[in-house]
Image (tube, rainbow, N blue to C red):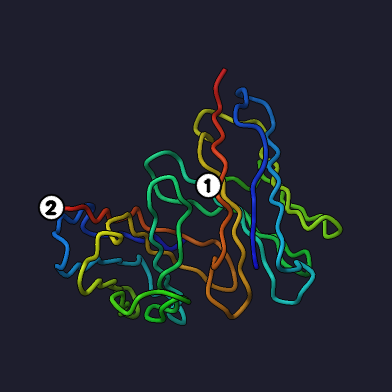
Amino acid sequence: DIVLTQSPGTLSLSPGERATLSCRASESVNNLYLAWYQQKPGQAPSLIIYAASRRATGISDRFSGSGSGTDFTLTISRLEPEDFAVYYCQQYGSSPPYSFGQGTKVEIK
Amino acid sequence: QVTLKESGPALVKPTQNLTLTCSFSGFSLSTPGMRVSWLRQPPGKAPEWLARIDWDDGKFYRSSLKTRLTISQDTSKDQVVLEVTNVDPADTASYYCARETRNRPPFDFWGQGILVTVSS
C-alpha cells in the first residue's frame, strides 16, 4: 500500500499569509490520483483538490495543488479565517486500497 | 441533491458485531460507475478507508481488516450496509460513508458520520 507522509504536522500562520503543505508518497502516484481534503472540527472531510491540481466545485482559487510522482503540494495563497483547519492528502484510483496522510493542522498564530 | 447519512449504534461491547447503514439519495448505485465507500476516523487521527462497493456489486476491502468486514447493498432501499465483526476498543471511531463516481473526483459527497464507541 502507498504510504503518504505529510509535513509539517502543524503550521502556525496569521490570516493573509501563504500556507504551503507537503505530501510525500512512498511510491509514485499513478495518473495524478492525489486529492486534498479540508476538515473542520465535528465535520466530515471535504474535497478541495483532485487529480493533484484541479479544484473541486465551489473551491476558492486561493487553493492550488501541484506536484507529480511522489511529491505533492497544497498552497493556500492568502489565509482567510475559514481556512484554519486540518488538511489531508489522499491517494485514490480505480482499485483500492486508498490511503490518507496523517494530516497538517493549519492554526492561527 | 446528493445526500448520505450513516446510522447504527453509538455504543458496542467488545467482541460484538457492529452493523452500520448508509442511506443515500440523489443518485442510484445501479448507475454504471457509481461507488460507495465506508471510511472511519479514530478521534484525533486521519481517516482510514475500509471498504467499497460498486454499481456492479464489485467489493473491495482494506487488507488488514478483510476478514472482519462485509459490505453489501440494498438497491431497493438505496442503502449500503457495513458489518464489522468481533469489535475491539481500537474500532472506536467516527464512521463515514462517501460517494465516488468512476473517472470523476473522489469522495465528492460524504455523510455526516456516526461516532461508534467500543467499550464494556
The residue located at (67%, 42%) in the rendering is: B7
Q: Is residue A54 above or below residue A42?
A: below
Q: Position of residue A70 (x, y in %)?
A: 33, 73
Rounded to the nearest angstrom, the CA distance separating label 2 from label 1 is: 30 Å
Tell me if residue B40 comes above or below residue A47 in the rendering. Answer: above
Q: Is residue A98 left or right of residue A60?
A: right
- Indicate the secondary structure of the residue bearing disc 1: strand
* Residue B63 seen in the current view: no
B42 vs B21, nearest the viewer: B21
What chain does badge 2 belong to?
Answer: A
Q: Residue at x 58, y 54 (%)?
A: B111
Image marks 2 and 1: residues in contact by CB distance under 8 Å: no
The image quadrant that residue B110 belongs to is: bottom right
Mark 2: give few (<14), some (14-19) or many (20+) Cα within 10 Å. Answer: few
> Under tag 2, what secondary structure?
loop
Residue B1 x %, y %: 65, 68
Q: Which residue is mark 1?
A: B40
Choose between B86 and B97: the one closer to the eye.
B97
Which kind of residue does numbered mark 2 sit on? Lys
Which label sits in the foreground, 2 or 1?
Answer: 2
Q: Quadrant for residue B88, please give it.
A: top right
Left or right of A39? Residue B100 is right
Q: Which mark is residue B109?
A: none
Please tell me how crowded label 1 is: few (under 14), some (14-19), or many (20+) other residues with Cα within 10 Å: many
Identified at 38% across, 60% down, the residue is A38
Q: Residue at x 67, y 45 (%)?
A: B69
Residue B19 in which image quadrant: top right
- Look at mark 2 in the image and give the residue it sits on: A109
**In the rendering, at what x and y percent does residue A75 appear?**
25, 73
Disc 1 marks which amino acid? Arg
Identify the chain of the residue marked 1, using the numbered disc in the image: B
Farthest right residue in view: B76
